[in-house]
Amino acid sequence: MNLTIGPLAETHERSRFSSGVEALDRWFHEQAGQSQRKRRTTVWVATEPSHPTVPLGYYSLAPFHVAFDHAPEALRKKLPPEPLYVALIARLAVATDARGRGLGGLLLIDAAKRALQASLQVPTHGVVVHAKDANAASFYRHYGFLPFPDDTLHLYAVVTEQVDMTLC
């Protein structure tokens, strides 16, 4: 699949995007631009080079922290008992007409790579997702994310330079 993944731009035709999940579509249509302009999230959009304004999928990244006592041992290992800073994949969606081509996995891997690169500049200890349901959690587990001990819909991956191999 020949794709370009880049930052959300005014030229993206967000109103054409439909993932079939109302909350994800509404956020992308109505709030993604504002969220990015106000630096609450970064929004990354996948398009085909032949149709650079038509979003096939997107994800957003945001800063987040996890209470030390809530964090899995793999995240807090050898760290002082303070909040742990992580990158949150706040939203990830694929257009219904682009499903079945592995785009969700490509978006997730891209998000993990960007989180790793950011962690080299501003330290973070992992990537966290809040899966909307058991199917979404299964998707993230397929790519190496692990559930928090007390919530199977709250998953994480430790950010290391091996993140590319772990998630591929």
Image (spheres, rainbow, N blue to C red):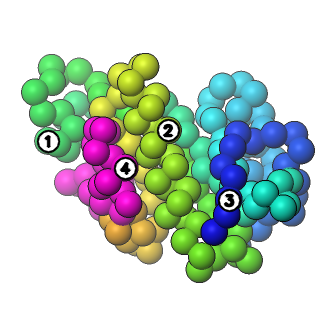
Q: CA distance from mark 3 to mark 2?
A: 16 Å
The earlier-in-sequence mark between 4 and 2 is 2
The stretch in magenta equals 143-168
Number of dots carrying numbers: 4
Residue corresponding to mark 4: 164
Q: CA distance from mark 3 to mark 4?
A: 18 Å
Q: Is residue 80 above or below residue 18?
A: above
Question: Mark 4, mark 2: which one is toward the viewer?
Answer: 4
- Taking the spot 38% from the left edge, 42% from the top edge, the residue there is 127
Q: Is residue 78 left or right of residue 72?
A: left
Q: How packed is label 4: few (under 14 Cα within 10 Å), some, or many (20 or more)?
A: some
Helix, strand or loop at label 4? It is: helix
Residue corresponding to mark 1: 73
Question: Mark 4, mark 1: which one is toward the viewer?
Answer: 4
Q: Disc 1 residue type?
A: Glu
Looking at this view, is 120 or 24 the one in front? Answer: 120
Q: How packed is label 2: few (under 14 Cα within 10 Å), some, or many (20 or more)?
A: few
The earlier-in-sequence mark between 2 and 1 is 1
Mark number displayed over residue 114 = 2
Residue corresponding to mark 3: 3
The earlier-in-sequence mark between 3 and 4 is 3
Quadrant hosting residue 113 = top left
**Quadrant where the C terminus lies?**
bottom left
Quadrant hosting residue 124 = top left
Q: CA distance from mark 4 to mark 2?
A: 10 Å
Q: CA distance from mark 4 to mark 1?
A: 21 Å
